Amino acid sequence: MSQEKMETPPGPSIDRELTAPKRRSRPKRVDGSDQAEPVKEPLSVLRLVRSYFESDNRPLSQRTGAFVGFRNAQDGILHCFRTQRNMRIHFIVLVAVLLSGLLLNFDNRDMLVLLFAITLVIVSEMFNTAVEIIVDMVTEHYNPAAKLAKDVAAGAVLLSAMNAIIAGVLIFFGQKKLVQIQEQMRQNTGPDIVQVVVIGVVALALLVIISKLLSNTGSPWHGGIISGHTALGFLLAMTIFFTAANSYIAVLAVLLAVLIAHSRVEAGVHSVREVILGAVIAIFLTSLVFRLMPLVRSWTMHRVTSPAAAMHSVGRPSDQLSQTPHKINERALDPSSSH
């Protein structure tokens, strides 16, 4: 009887255990602080795609995902751009060549040749950087073989740069190319829409990424001093604005770009200043292609053709003056002229 009393707890304690809710332990943070971890919301499709391309600080062995190769390639390109001064020069030359091709109304073949030549220089510079990193990793002291490896890689960059220069000279000056360029500029036809969109997107992406790297703000695909999504939206909208025959379509395209900018501010990714800066850059780039470049072409052709026209106009009165004495003498010798 005494054993049953010891094993069986009293009645009030049983009721207390049944009625009192069990206290759940609060999950602690990784650092050990007594604070609950924020609930992770499910990633949307856009966030999932963006997470693949954002910079990942984990080791290469721990990186997983379908686009891990693209992310690693992005890290390599950004490293070359940060550490190599020549790489930054190559990218600036690439943007300048693409814009000059739009100014001179180059066809797709010439643009592809120029783009391939400059891309070959950039790829050679990246291989040169990779060789330098490997040589510095395996050698600690001066080694003639290491010097030879670096010299060979630098020679490859030199050959690719010479190839780009020769391609540019042949495109600009070969086979009466200047005459063809003048004829195209004299016609002053509008630029190809496909060229404007492709070159505009490439140039705009390079400008946005370069500005983020130089300012050390955000990542190439998220945040930063310039809103890339806003810039791309206004680039497409202003292209429609300058080329669309219907004004309602142009206004609707601009309103869609404004909505994109507003969504970036509402999401907290960018501030109003960063969104405005992206829109201004896109508007300036499209205005440069569709408004300023035709004015530059017409002004250039006017300066080229005006001396010849002036000489032609000056020569015509002199011919008339040289013919007037002969006409007077003929009238004086003609007897019918006196009557």
Image (cartoon, helix red, strand yellow):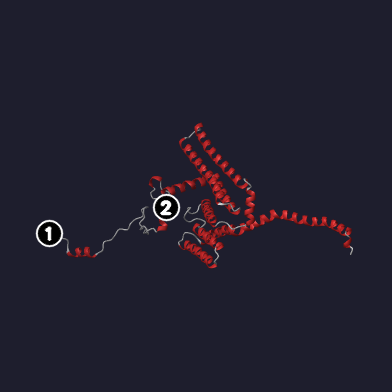
Instruction: Give the mark, 2 or 1, whose residue is nearer the N terminus.
Output: 1
Name the residue that disc number 2 marks: 52
Identity of the residue drawn at 63% across and 56% down? 187
Location of the C terminus (image quadrant): bottom right
Residue type indicated by callout 1:
Glu
Q: In the image, residue 333 lies at what x, y percent?
A: 89, 58
- The residue lying furthest to the front in this view is 336
Mark carried by residue 332: none
Mark carried by residue 4: 1
In terms of depth relative to the viewer, which is nearer, 336 or 188?
336
> How many badges with numbers are in the image?
2
Residue type indicated by callout 2:
Tyr
Identity of the residue drawn at 52% across and 44% down? 120
Q: Quick check: 327 left or right of 208?
A: right
Q: In the image, residue 102 lies at what x, y percent?
A: 58, 54
Q: Quick check: 175 left or right of 45?
A: right
Asked which secondary structure carries label 1, the reply is: helix
| Mark pair 2, 1: CA separation | 65 Å
Q: Quick check: 171 left or right of 253?
A: right
In terms of depth relative to the viewer, which is nearer, 200 or 10?
200
Discs 2/1, front: 2
In this rendering, does residue 162 appear at all? yes
Q: In the image, residue 150 lies at what x, y percent?
A: 52, 36
In this rendering, does residue 143 appear at all? no
Asked which secondary structure carries label 2, the reply is: helix
- The residue lying furthest to the left in this view is 1
Q: Is residue 171 above or below residue 288?
A: above
